[in-house]
Image (cartoon, grey):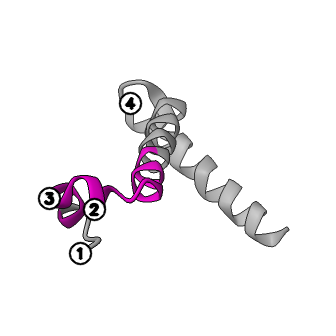
Amino acid sequence: PSVTIIGSAILGALAGASDVLGVIGGGTGILLMVDILINYYQQLIREQVEVVMPRLGALLGRK
């Protein structure tokens, strides 16, 4: 439970800071973009991208 609370506090601080700084799309947009990018990265790794596209695998640091 403490990890959840700490993670929520960090995400809330990130969203609040980006709203205060006037980031395009606001804090929620930044969090959504980061989440989508992380999911794409995890999907590429799951599909063993280094077997299909060796150069992309090397770019991601898998080889």
Q: Report how far apart the C-alphas of labels 3 and 4 lie in the structure.
A: 37 Å
Residue assigned mark 1 = 63
Mark 2 vs mark 4: in front:
2
Determine whether the residue tagged by mark 3 lies in a helix, strand or loop: helix
Q: In the image, residue 21 lies at what x, y percent?
A: 39, 37
Which numbered circle lies on residue 22? 4
Residue type at numbered disc 4 = Gly
Residue type at numbered disc 2 = Glu
Q: Residue at x 69, y 54 (%)?
A: 8
The mark nearer the N terminus, 1 or 3, is 3
Which numbered circle lies on residue 50? 2
Local packing at callout 4 (Cα closer than 10 Å; few below 14, some 14-19, many 20+) is: few
Q: How many marks?
A: 4
Task: Decide: is 19 above or below 53.
Answer: above
Residue type at numbered disc 3 = Arg
Instruction: Please report the bounds of the magenta region as a residue range.
Output: 40-58
Determine whether the residue tagged by mark 4 lies in a helix, strand or loop: loop
